[in-house]
Image: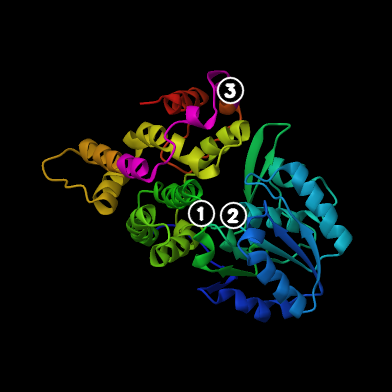
Amino acid sequence: MLGNFEYCNPTKLYFGEDSLDYLNTELPKYGANVVLIYGGGSIKKNGIYDDVCRILKENGKNVAEISGVMPNPTLAKLYEGVEIARNHQADLLLAVGGGSVCDYAKAVSVSVNCEEDPWEKYYVRFEEPECETLPVGCVLTMVGTGSEMNAGAVITNHETKQKIGHVFADEKIMPRFAVLNPGYTLTLPHYQMVSGIYDIFNHICEQYFSGEDDNTSDYISEGLMRSLLHSSRIANQNPQDYEARSNIMWTATWALNTLVAKGKTTDWMVHMLGQSVGAYTNATHGMTLAAVSLPYYRHIMPYGLKKFRRFAVNVWDIDPAGKSDEQIAEEGLKAMESWMKELGLVMNISDLGATEEMLEGITDGTLVMTGGYKVLERDEILQIFRESMKKE
């Protein structure tokens, strides 16, 4: 395991069917003014909203709300939330929802006391906060992003057609606490469930497909991927299987809480490709990743052949006997493709609303990362998108 690194993750997790009760442990640590942040209103239908509001009231909190946070939170919504949090003199931001709501809360956290435009500072210049930030807590209702235990925040700017994530360097941006009740995820539509599952899987891949050294992080990643494959197949057949959904939830957290990135350069090009598609189509995040993954991985496989061979054998149980490394690696990607189709994932960006006329703009909007096995040129990015357009 090469390189030097530090590791700190201060987020306190409460996991299980009774985990919401631990809000009573956390809320007294913060001031009276809480901003409750949530999405389109599903938490009002399933009772989570009432439960959270009851606990907030019992703890004497003065509550303001930011509702309607969309699956791809926009810059306009960020400005709205900053104004609400400022006017409320917020002491705590409590996000109740999926990863987008958690991401959004962190973006508000770093922007409330920022004297500059947050888009320019955090998403164009990628600077770090110099102002005081607000603490964030999360009650998770959908899994996939790992946002409950990391410092990432993705925001979409419709004016510039950009969807950009900033993983802040300071661990204080991470949620102070997160409540993970797998039961809250059981009411998700199948489309959202499998989209989240692929998001989890690809988070692991983005870190795994980098580096050449023997790295403990890769062994952990392989175990997480195998666990996810097992649980995803059970959940796909029976979405109400609590054990499978609980394992998926726990895997999601460990897939992106920075642990398996340690000692790795990490790739993240699938996310850059997918996010650019999402900026033009507003498609569900996990589906944009699914639609671009295989064209990308087949493109870079010759440059990281050793790792793709390992992936095939250790994750997909491909028998290497009598086969070349190229054959083994390709069989691994074919097994991955079969699993993706089994789940019902979207396999091309055409079905997400991308058109031929959009491709040049989507290509220009794709940020190029340098930590993977191949640093892409513009013509390669465009070709990957063209491959991603194809339907079988």
Q: Quadrant of the N terminus?
A: bottom left
Alpha-carbon span between mark 1 and mark 2: 7 Å
Q: Judging from the image, what secondary structure is the residue with disc 1 in?
A: loop
- Mark 1–mark 2 contact, CB under 8 Å? yes
Q: Earlier in the sequence, mark 3 or mark 1?
A: 1
Residue 99 tag number: 2
Q: CA distance from mark 3 to mark 1?
A: 27 Å
Q: Residue furthest top?
A: 357
Report if residue 60 is visible in the image.
yes
Callouts 3 and 1 close, C-beta under 8 Å: no
Q: Quadrant of residue 22?
A: bottom right
The magenta-colored residue range is 336-361
Q: Is residue 333 left or right of residue 253?
A: left
What residue appears at the point 64 percent right and 49 percent down from the top-left corner? 166
- Residue for badge 1: 144
* Label whose residue precedes the other's in the sequence (1 or 2): 2
Residue at the extreme front of the image, as rendered? 45
The residue positioned 26% from the left and 40% from the top of the image is 329
Q: Nearer the viewer, residue 236 or 115?
A: 236
Residue that sits furthest to the right in the current view: 87
Mark 2, Cα crowd under 10 Å, few <14 / some 14-19 / many 20+, is many
Q: Secondary structure at mark 3?
A: helix
Amino acid tagged 1: Gly
Residue type highlighted by circle 2:
Gly
Query: Where does residue 107 sit, x and y in percent of width and height?
Result: 71, 53
Q: Is residue 61 left or right of residue 150?
A: right
Mark 1 closeness class: few <14, some 14–19, many ≥20 residues within 10 Å: many
**Label 3 belongs to which residue?**
358
* Element under disc 2: helix
Q: Amino acid at mark 3?
A: Met
